Image: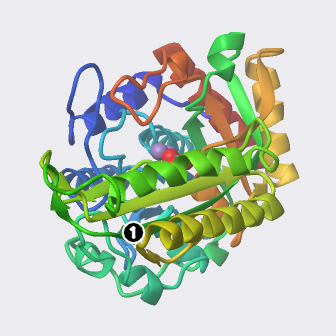
C-alpha cells in the first residue's frame, strides 16, 4: 500500500477550508473565481509544486499538477456552491494531492492532480471540465452569465497565471475521483465506501416570463399579469404532468428565482428562474424537456406573458469504466471487507466530462445525515481516511 499520511491529508483539508470559511460548523463560501477561490487555487498550486508536480493553469483556470510521463489523473474541484460545505470537491482534490505525494515519496506510479474550475456551475454545469472535454465549446462558455449577469469570459480573466493551452489528455491513462456521497445511503447503512457504477444525466436552463408591473393596491386581481403567480401555476402544473413520466429517482428543482422588482407593494412584472432536472435515462430527460416547454408556453399564452428560454445546458448519463471501477472494488474489499457497495451517483461530477477523454471511475465516502450543498455537510474523519486508503489502494492495483 502506498504510504499515505493521514495527518498530513487531514491538515491540508482543514487548511483548504480556511479559504472562504463561513457559517456555522465547517461551512464554506468559495464560488468559482471569487477571491477565496483564486487564493485557494494559489495555495493548492504551491502544495503541488512542493510535491514535485509541475503546475499548469489552463485557460479556464482549472489547476493541474502534472507528473512526468504517462500518469493516472486524480482530483475533483475546489470551488463551492454559494453556500457549501468543506468537503464537496475539496476532498477529492486533497486526497489526490496526498496520493500523488505519497507515491512520489515511495517511487510509486506517477500520479497527477487536478482541481477543475466552476464544477458547481456558477456559469454552466461543471464548466471547467466541460470545456476541457469538448462537451462545451469555449466560445459558448464565454457567453454564459452568472445570476448577476457577469460573463464567464470576464470571470475567467480574473484567474492569474493561466496558460493559453489546455492540457493534452493523452498524457493520462485514466481518472479517479473521490467524493462525498452527498446522499443518505452509506451513512444510513453503516457502510464505509460506495463504488460508483454510473452518474445520472442533467438538463438545466433559465426561463423568463414578462407580464406587467403595477400597483399592488389598486390593480384588480382580475387581469393582473403577475409573474410570481405565473411561476406558481407553472410549478403546480409541471408536477402534475411529470407524474406519468418520472421514476422515484427522477428529480427536478427550481433553485434560483429572480423576481422583479421584488417589493411588497408591487405586482411583479418579471421573473427569471432556473429549471433543472436529472435522471439516469436520456430519453426521459428529453420527454421532461418537452413537458416543461409545453407547460410554460401554455401558462404564458393563457396569462399574456412574454416567454424566453436561456441556453439548454446538459450532460448525458455515463457509466464508469469497468477496469478502473474493478480496481476500486478490489481495494475497498481489501480495506473494508463487506462494508462497501456499488451505487449510482445522483450528483454530477467532473468525471462525467472526463469520461469523454479517458476511462474514469469514482468512489464515495459517507455524508453524515446525507447533507450537502449546505453548511452542515460533514463526514467523520475516520471515514475520510478510509476513502484515502481505498483510493491509494486502487492506484496500486492499477499499477
Ligand atoms: O450539482 C451537482 O450535482 C454538483 O454538485 N455540481
Ligand atoms: Mn462536487
Ligand atoms: Mn457540489
Q: Is residue 161 left or right of residue 101?
A: left
Q: Is residue 285 left or right of residue 39?
A: right
Q: Quadrant of residue 312?
A: bottom right
- Residue 113 visible to the viewer: no
| Residue 360 position in % (x across, y down) | 72, 56
Callout count: 1
Q: Residue at x 25, y 50 (%)?
A: 40
Q: Is residue 137 left or right of residue 195?
A: left
Q: Is residue 53 left or right of residue 41?
A: right
Q: Residue at x 80, y 50 (%)?
A: 245
Q: Secondary structure at mark 1?
A: strand
| Residue 296 position in % (x across, y down) | 55, 65
Q: Dot 1 surroundings within 10 Å: few (below 14), some, or many (20 or more)? A: many
Q: Nearer the viewer, residue 43 or 126?
A: 126
| Residue 33 position in % (x across, y down) | 25, 62
Q: Which residue is mark 1?
A: 209
| Residue 8 position in % (x across, y down) | 38, 29
Q: Residue at x 46, y 37 (%)?
A: 91
Q: Nearer the viewer, residue 238 or 191?
A: 238
Amino acid at each position: 500500500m502506498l504510504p499515505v499520511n493521514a495527518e498530513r491529508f487531514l491538515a491540508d483539508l482543514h487548511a483548504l477550508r480556511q479559504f472562504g470559511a463561513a457559517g456555522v460548523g465547517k461551512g464554506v463560501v468559495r464560488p468559482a473565481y471569487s477571491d477565496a477561490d483564486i487564493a485557494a487555487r494559489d495555495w493548492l498550486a504551491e502544495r503541488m509544486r512542493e510535491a514535485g508536480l509541475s503546475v499548469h493553469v489552463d485557460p479556464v483556470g482549472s489547476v493541474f499538477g502534472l507528473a512526468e510521463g504517462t500518469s493516472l489523473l486524480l482530483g475533483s474541484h475546489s470551488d463551492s456552491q454559494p453556500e457549501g460545505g468543506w468537503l464537496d470537491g475539496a476532498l477529492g482534490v486533497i486526497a489526490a494531492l496526498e496520493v500523488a505525494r505519497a507515491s512520489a515519496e515511495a517511487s510509486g506510479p506517477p500520479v497527477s492532480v487536478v482541481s477543475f474550475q466552476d464544477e458547481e456551475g456558477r456559469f454552466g454545469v461543471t464548466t471547467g471540465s466541460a470545456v476541457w472535454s469538448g462537451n462545451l465549446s469555449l466560445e459558448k462558455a464565454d457567453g454564459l452569465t452568472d445570476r448577476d449577469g457577469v460573463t464567464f469570459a470576464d470571470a475567467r480573466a480574473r484567474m492569474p497565471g493561466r496558460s493559453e493551452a489546455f492540457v493534452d489528455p493523452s498524457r493520462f491513462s485514466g481518472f479517479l475521483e473521490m467524493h462525498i456521497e452527498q446522499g443518505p445511503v452509506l451513512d444510513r447503512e453503516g457502510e464505509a465506501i460506495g463504488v460508483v457504477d454510473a452518474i445520472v444525466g442533467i438538463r438545466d436552463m433559465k426561463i423568463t416570463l414578462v407580464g406587467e408591473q403595477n400597483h399592488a393596491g389598486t390593480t384588480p386581481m382580475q387581469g393582473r399579469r403577475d409573474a410570481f403567480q405565473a411561476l406558481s401555476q407553472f410549478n403546480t402544473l409541471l408536477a402534475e404532468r411529470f407524474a406519468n413520466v418520472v421514476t422515484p429517482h427522477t428529480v427536478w428543482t427550481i433553485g434560483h428565482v429572480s423576481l422583479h422588482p421584488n417589493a411588497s407593494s408591487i405586482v411583479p412584472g418579471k421573473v427569471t428562474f432556473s429549471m433543472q432536472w436529472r435522471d439516469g435515462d436520456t430519453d426521459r430527460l428529453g420527454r421532461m424537456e418537452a413537458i416543461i416547454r409545453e407547460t410554460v408556453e401554455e401558462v404564458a399564452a393563457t396569462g399574456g406573458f412574454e416567454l424566453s428560454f436561456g441556453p439548454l445546458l446538459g450532460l448525458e448519463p455515463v457509466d464508469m469504466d469497468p477496469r478502473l471501477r474493478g480496481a476500486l472494488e478490489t481495494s475497498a474489499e481489501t480495506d473494508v471487507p463487506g462494508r462497501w457497495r456499488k451505487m449510482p451517483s445522483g450528483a454530477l461530477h467532473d468525471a462525467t466530462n472526463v469520461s469523454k477523454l479517458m476511462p474514469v471511475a469514482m468512489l464515495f465516502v459517507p455524508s453524515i445525515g446525507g447533507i450537502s450543498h449546505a453548511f452542515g455537510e460533514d463526514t467523520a474523519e475516520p471515514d475520510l481516511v478510509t476513502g484515502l486508503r481505498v483510493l491509494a489502494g486502487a492506484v496500486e492495483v492499477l499499477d
